[in-house]
Amino acid sequence: MIPFRLVLQPGIPLHEQVAFAAKKAMMSGRLRPGEPFPSVRTLSRELKIHVNTAQRVVAALTQEGLLEVRPGIGTVVCQPAPARRYDRGRVLGPEVDQLVVEAMKMGLTLEDLQETVEERWRRLQPERAAAKANQP
């Protein structure tokens, strides 16, 4: 069973959508560090995607340091390392710029945007807190 939901969106590459859904599950605590991540075959079968697409997802998440392949065990979720200031700007810069431009196009104020981001942040936090509470 796949521990995250995928809602397909046209115009976005499938491997990016699957990787984002997995990252969201990791950040919310539904997928915790040390837990097994579905194999390429399982991802392919359960999500009904090509095995090469599933392989791209696992490779991308591994390259980002979110997954680790352990010989004899399989692929497991890693504890994400805290981002340094430079890394945050480099990684999040384009997405933040896009978010700001879209908000401005819609006529939102900075306060509106902050409120929306805070709401989304809080929506993920309860899942993360519940997942931590269920850890042994």
Image: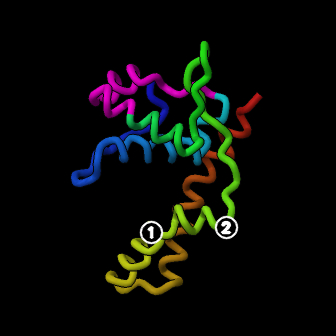
Q: Is residue 29 above or below residue 123?
A: above
Q: Is the residue under label 2 in contact with that under label 1 (CB below 8 Å)?
A: no
Q: Residue furthest top?
A: 72
What residue type is disc 2 on?
Answer: Arg
Left or right: 62 in relation to 11 = right
Which residue is more in the foreground, 62 or 22? 62
What residue type is disc 1 on?
Answer: Pro
Tag 2 or tag 1, which sits nearer the N-term? 2
The picture places residue 54, in percent across and down from the top left corner, at 37, 31
The picture places residue 63, in percent across and down from the top left corner, at 52, 41
Q: Main secondary structure of the magenta part?
A: helix
Q: Residue at x 41, y 39 (%)?
A: 5
Residues rendered magenta in the picture: 35-55
Read off the residue under disc 1. 94
Q: Is residue 10 above or below residue 109?
A: above
The picture places residue 35, in percent across and down from the top left corner, at 62, 28
Read off the residue under disc 2. 85
Is 43 in the magenta? Answer: yes
Looking at the rendered structure, the secondary structure element under dot 1 is helix
Q: How is the image coloured?
A: rainbow
Quadrant showing the C terminus:
top right
Say which quarter of the image contains residue 31.
Answer: top right
